Image (tube, rainbow, N blue to C red):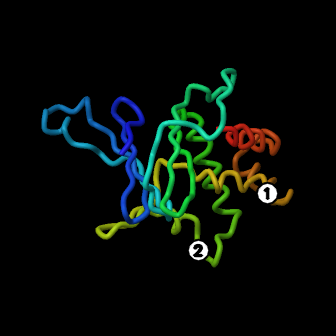
Amino acid sequence: VQILGEDIYLGCEHTYNLFTLRRQADAATDEERQLLQCVGEFHLGEQVNAIQQGSLVMQLPDSPLADVPTFVFGTVNGAIGVVASIPEDLFRKLDKLQKCLTRVIQGVGGLSHNEWRSFASQRRTAEARNFIDGDLVESLLDLRKEKLQEVAEAMQMPVDEICQLVEDLRFH
């Protein structure tokens, strides 16, 4: 478990999921304030064995995301990933992009992106929420022109603006 912010925590578990918890500091009773509410769930597909505050690249001070806290994680299979607490307006834009991409890109082996990233434990299964899949978002840059245009129309943004948004994220 890592502390992402004053009342937000990042955790991982043995069924290859990441999750975020929020302490309910504004709750009415002491008992409710002691409870952690699950606010984000995401199936990573690998078991995380280390999470450390840091970045894979040097942060440029003039970058719009320079103050965004980032955490690097490592998995038992040797994969490395990054979790970042991004501003809500950027999250909404990337979440919309992610949803558009899942309609345009076919999953490997016929498995939908939503099925693959759904949180699944021994007790329950739930659709992924409040996480952006960076691999999916970066796949935008590999799309053919007609697919890019399809995403741009769904996003109601110019293609070059969407591509620039994704390119800027690659350095975080």
Quarter of the rendering occupied by the C terminus: top right
Identified at 58% across, 65% down, the residue is 113
Count of number-bearing discs? 2
- Which of 158 and 88 lies nearest the eye of the viewer? 88
When asked about the image quadrant of residue 63, the answer is top right
The residue that appears at 61% across and 48% down in the rendered structure is 96
Q: Earlier in the sequence, mark 1 or mark 2?
A: 2
Q: In the image shown, does 17 or 48 lie closer to the viewer?
A: 48
Per the rendering, the mark at residue 56 is none
Please provide percent x and percent y for residue 19.
40, 51
Q: Quadrant of residue 162?
A: top right
> From what the image shows, is residue 163 above or below residue 114?
above
Secondary structure, mark 2, is loop
In the rendered view, would you say 113 is above or below 153? below
> Is 23 displayed left or right of 86 in the figure?
left
Residue 142: assigned label = 1
Looking at the image, which residue is at 65% across and 49% down? 97
x 43%, y 63%: residue: 16
Residue 114 horizontal/vertical position (percent): 53, 64
Q: Residue 11: x and y, percent?
A: 38, 49
Residue 111 is marked as: 2
For label 2, the crowd category at 10 Å Cα-Cα, with few meaning under 14, some 14 to 19 and many 20 or more, is: few
Q: Position of residue 85 (x, y in %)?
A: 50, 37
Q: Is residue 54 left or right of residue 29?
A: right
Amino acid type indicated by mark 1? Asp
The residue lying furthest to the bottom in this view is: 109
Q: If the image is split into quadrants, where does the N terminus sit?
A: top left
Q: Quadrant of residue 62?
A: top right
Mark 1 closeness class: few <14, some 14–19, many ≥20 residues within 10 Å: few
Amino acid at dot 2: Leu
Q: Residue furthest top?
A: 62
Q: Is 117 above or below relative to 31?
A: below
